[in-house]
Image (cartoon, grey):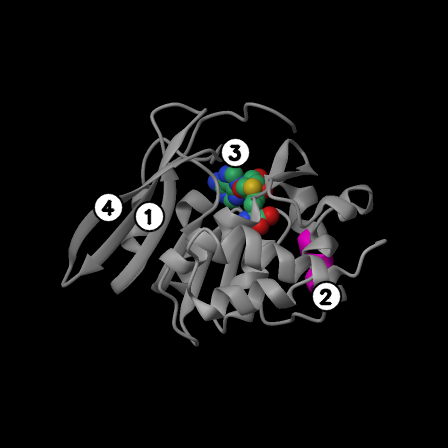
Amino acid sequence: MMVDPKRLRDKMVREQLERRGIRDERVLNAMRILPRHLFVQDALAAKAYTDAPLPIGEGQTISQPYVVALMSEALELQPGMKVLEIGTGSGYQAAVLAEMGAEVYTVERIRKLFFAARKRFVDMRMFSVKLKLDDGTMGWKDEAPFDRIIVTAGGPEVPGPLVDQLSDDGRLIIPVGGTRRSQRLVVVTKQGGVVSESDMGGVTFVDLVGTHGWENARTGE
Ligand code: SAH
């Protein structure tokens, strides 16, 4: 990279995150530290800190930095919590959560992306993140329950198995939409066995494909 990535990250955090109201210091710190340019293809490294999602192959994208920050903050994460992510993609969101002190489990359904993310974690010596190649709409039953669940792809509904695998006092965040082009960011909470939902506003994500997601991939593969 031509420009010092640390300076680009500080600028990204100031201008894209703090300016738009992200306050969680753990989120801001993680995103100041993590080399986002190593989570995209070399040809896109120079664009890694821009205010946009970027293609990661297979028709998928790494989310815009602000969206990663917004969802990470909305999780209300405490260090040591067990977190399940559906949609590993590049691995960047999982790395942010790990850097924030969470015990991260992440599931990806596309083989190529799964292996690329796994290699990235090894190269970066981030051995604590556990990865699985599977349909994440079924959750990760052997490791349940989870304190927090984050879905980084948009589905038609909140997958039932994920709600079941959420611990009491747990929070689940997922883009849900009636169409594949736009979703609402939904926060599902469980308290005393009672499940409630709140809406954080409109977002656009790639498809959540699987048993409790959309039936077919729209692009890629
Ligand atoms: N969190 C990622 C963003 C990835 S985009 C990052 O930080 O880079 C969403 C990802 O969800 C894609 O890689 C897509 O293949 C994956 N995905 C879609 N449906 C899935 C499913 N049912 N289970 C697991 N992963 C899924």
Query: Which residue is more in the foreground, 17 or 118?
Result: 17
Labelled disc at residue 206: 3
Labelled disc at residue 198: 4
C-alpha separation, residue under disc 4 versus residue under disc 3: 21 Å
- As shown in the figure, which amino acid type bears the numbered disc 1? Pro
Check residue 6 for magenta coloring: no
Crowding around mark 3 (Cα neighbors within 10 Å: few <14, some 14 to 19, many 20+) is many
Dot 4 or dot 3: first in sequence order is 4
| Circles 2, 1 touching at the beta carbon (< 8 Å) | no
Check residue 118 for magenta coloring: yes
Q: Respond yes or no on whether mark 3 lies under 8 Å from ligand 1.
A: yes
| Circles 4, 1 touching at the beta carbon (< 8 Å) | no
Marks 4 and 3: which is nearer the front? 4
- As shown in the figure, which amino acid type bears the numbered disc 2? Val
Magenta stretch in the rendered image: 117-121
Dot 2 or dot 3: first in sequence order is 2
Q: From the top left corner, tell me how far across and down residue 205 is, in percent.
A: 49, 35
Q: Quadrant of ligand 1?
A: top right
Q: Which residue is mark 2?
A: 122
